Amino acid sequence: MANIVLIGFMGSGKSTIGSALAQKMGRFLLDTDSLIQTTYNQHIPEIFAQYGEQKFRELESQAIAWLSANVSNAIIATGGGMPIFNDISTLGEIYYLQSDFETILARLDHQERSKRPLFGDQAQAKALYLERQNLYAKVAHHTINANNDIPEILTEILTRHNASKRF
């Protein structure tokens, strides 16, 4: 069976929804940021600080190649920039978790925002959010309203997944 791939802006709920979806469907969850952190034994902000964003994007590309070759029937939660800078079409059925910027801010406390390198400046983060919205929508097979509660989001994903003839 094909993977279900969750994309969206930082803080849109990819890891949280991915975990709940994996549990509900009896699949395992792979979070690409966690995969990179474990593989390279460094946190994402450390990789950005030490090697820069370009190197991080290369590591994401390597993760995509590995996942495409070795993983099926999983839930994959991507980093926010992964579908912007890399072709993820080989990973599976792609769901864009679309959240309002204000909803994202409400979900992430100061400590959580400080862990995200591109969230250092809120005005820049909002500009990046606005820039990426159409790009996420173009890549996705499905757009999901992620402003809703987790049970509603899960129901929408499962309904669309079960109705999909492509995967």
Image: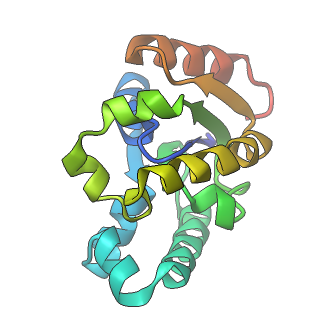
Q: Residue at x 34, y 82 (%)?
A: 49
Can residue 78 be spotted in the picture? no
Q: Residue at x 51, y 84 (%)?
A: 55
- In this image, 116 relative to 41: left or right? right
Give the total of numbered labels: 0
Q: Which quarter of the figure has residue 3?
A: top right
Q: Position of residue 48 (x, y in %)?
A: 39, 78
Is 87 drawn above or below residue 145 in the view shown? below
Q: Residue at x 34, y 88 (%)?
A: 50
Can residue 51 be spotted in the picture? yes
For this orientation, the residue located farthest to the bottom is 51
Q: Quadrant of the N terminus?
A: top right
For this orientation, the residue located farthest to the left is 111
Q: Which quarter of the figure has residue 166?
A: top right
- In this image, 48 relative to 83: left or right? left
Is 35 drawn above or below residue 18 in the view shown? below
For this orientation, the residue located farthest to the front is 123
166, 5: nearer the viewer: 5
Is 3 drawn above or below residue 45 in the view shown? above
Is 149 drawn above or below residue 104 in the view shown? above
Q: Quadrant of the C terminus?
A: top right
115, 26: nearer the viewer: 115
122, 93: nearer the viewer: 122
- In this image, 63 relative to 18: left or right? right
Q: Position of residue 116 (x, y in %)?
A: 35, 59
